[in-house]
Image (cartoon, grey):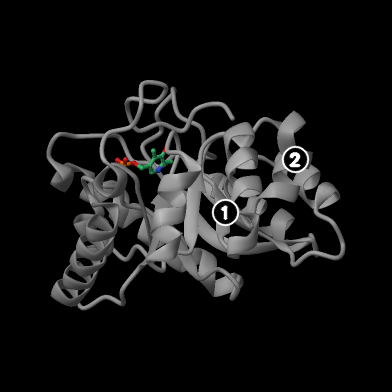
Amino acid sequence: MRVRALKDILLQLKNAADASGRPEPRLLAVSKTQDATAVAELADAGQRAFGENYVQEAAAKRAALADRGLEWHLIGHLQSNKAREAADLFDWVQTVDRPKLVEALARHRAGDRAPLNVLIQVNIDDEASKHGCQPDDVPALAQAIAAQPRLCLRGLMVIPTPHADPERRRPALARTRALFDALRTGHPTADTLSMGMSDDFAVAIAEGATMVRIGTALFGARKSRESGVGNRES
Ligand SMILES: *Cc1c(COP(=O)(O)O)cnc(C)c1O
């Protein structure tokens, strides 16, 4: 079932990329609320990168699947007091949105590991309820990250305001793309634009996403704990 969904999504990503003349994006399989067995099933089918919203939940799955060589991404909001654990558990943190977190992650990333890949989360629609920095804050935050040898600045992540019609997300996605292009001129390591989810990945790819984060379309509806798309406290 899930393996079929994976193949189907990969084909849809390719088609969306071809239709808009963009390179194929990487797929991040969002496995929050799904158990380790579900993750293992996709790993067996070749999926390597998995996204989790909660540090505790990710720790358990990572431990259960330690021998698989998977790549774990934190896509939920991170409190500074969990930065130590996150810096150890994850290969990527996609939700860096303030200088304090940059310092904490850099301090706790062990010297014998590869640098922690980080994305700056931008609150592109300026929603009071959302995490993420303001677009104007990106250059300073990028400088702060680039100054940390234990971190590697890889790009930007956004969660635009949901709309029943994904076309209505397009302007926000296009603004993010412009921000990303500006970022890259000064930061050559920034190669990743993480945007697009189950209901809007085609539009996001057309606007230049290089990584899409897909949960529901791969695993089916989430269990009760997290009904909607969110970026809640880790
Ligand atoms: C849950 C979540 C997703 C996946 O959303 P789906 O609509 O299930 O594909 C992507 N990004 C973030 C930040 C999420 O919290």
Tell me the amino acid under the disc marked 2: Glu
Observer-nearest residue: 43 or 77? 43
Residue 97 visible in the displayed image: no
**Disc 2, SS:** helix
Which numbered circle lies on residue 116? none
Q: What percent of the width, then of the height, locates residue 158?
A: 42, 46
The three-letter code of the residue at mark 1 reads Trp
Residue drawn at point x = 21 percent, y = 78 percent: 21
Which residue is located at x 24 percent, y 47 percent? 217
Q: How far apart are labels 2 and 1 at the CA level?
A: 13 Å
| Residue 89 percent coordinates (x, y) | 69, 48
Name the quadrant where ligand 1 sits.
top left
**Which of 121 and 33 lies nearest the eye of the viewer?**
33
The x, y position of residue 44, in whole percent, is: 43, 64
The residue pinned by badge 1 equals: 72
Of residue 59 and residue 163, the one placed in the foreground of this image is 59
Residue toward you, 125 or 155:
155
Image quadrant occupied by the C terminus: top right
- Point 29% across, 59% down: residue: 3
Left or right: 10 in relation to 193:
left
Quick one: label 2, few (<14), some, or many (20+) residues within 10 Å? some
Using residue 50 as the reference point, say whether residue 152 is left or right of it. Answer: right
Q: In terms of image quadrants, where is residue 98?
A: top right
State the SS at label 1: strand
Which residue shows up at 16% across the image and 71% down it? 15
Locate residue 164 relative to residue 151 in the image: left or right.
left
> Which residue carries the number 2 mark?
85
Q: Quadrant of residue 187?
A: bottom right
Which x, y percent locates residue 115? Answer: 74, 64
